Image (cartoon, helix red, strand yellow):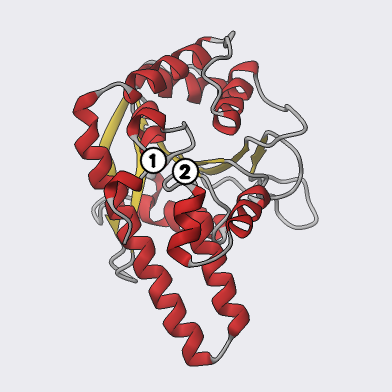
Amino acid sequence: MPSQRKIIPLSELPLRNDFMFGEVMRTSEICQLFLEELLGVSIQRIEFIDKQKDLSDSYTHHGIRLDVYLKDEAGTVFNVEMQSVPNGNLAKRARFYQGAIDRNELSKAIDYDNLPESFVIFACDFDYFKIGKAVGERVSFLKGTETAYNDGSHVFFLNSHYTEGNASPSILEFLDMIRTNDLEKTYETPLGQKAKARVQAVRSDRTLEVPYMTYAQKMLDERKLAYNEGLIEGEAKGEARGRDKGVNESIAALKGILEPNVIAERFKVPLDRVLKIFEQI
């Protein structure tokens, strides 16, 4: 297990790092600007429900941790998540998140009609659907018609590696900051300016050193466990390709947490392999 000194220091954390993203997006003014620009709505007030809200699924006992979970003055629920590596099926993850959010919001004494509007928003540092658009929104229609199927749930996939800027200048600047980690750039929009200032403030906040190191070590422990379990499963099945895939996914998951040379040493693989995996993300 790598020592804490090998974890990327707080003073260098990029916006795409989960910890940094959470600190930035749990700043009310920034989160409100982000939602207004993305959705084209006016929000009077937002309320964060919990810091890294944990929802337990009573049906599967599968817990999920929501990074940024909030409501507006109308009771609309928003969950905003940073996805730095393309691990897993995001469409099904969004479905699972929405189900868990709905069960959390609806007690047995309340009618289904009272379910609030909900938004699951994934800010991705990759083009998940390979469509080039900065913003992809899930929409549903009845088959063979143009009749919208609207159950009050919404999913947005943001792509920092966009080739088509189908979003406001504010959202594009925010995505550019995720992709480039460029804090030398002069950002033109209030969202870009405030996000840049917040990243700089978090990097220099000594009171966040211990919470960050605790968080980073926990993430490393979880990923080490997942990696070891993957190796055991792969060995039991005798699937070399499965083991290689598990190693690659574990390496990808450590982007933004450990330096490439440290990852190469830990997994006993060439540094070129680590860099190639990062380039493919």
Query: How busy is the neighbourhood of tag 1: few (under 14 within 10 Å), some, or many (20 plus)?
Result: some
Work out which quarter of the rendered image holds the N terminus and state it.
bottom left
Of label 2 and label 1, which has the lower sequence position? 1
Query: Where residue 195 is drawn, which disc sits there?
Result: none
Residue 135 location in percent, x, y? 66, 35
Query: Is mark 2 in CB contact (under 8 Å) with mark 1?
Result: yes
Q: Which element is circle 1 on?
A: loop
Q: Is residue 267 above or below residue 106?
A: below
Residue 83 location in percent, x, y? 51, 46
Query: How busy is the neighbourhood of tag 2: few (under 14 within 10 Å), some, or many (20 plus)?
Result: many
Residue sitting at x 41%, y 41%:
18
Residue sitting at x 70%, y 50%:
129
Is residue 39 among what the camera can see? no
Residue that carries the numbered disc 1 in the rendered image: 8
Residue 80 location in percent, x, y? 44, 38
Residue that carries the numbered disc 2 in the rendered image: 256
Residue sitting at x 73%, y 36%:
133
Q: Is residue 170 above or below residue 220?
A: above
Taking depth in this image into account, of 172 and 252 the one nearest to the observer is: 252
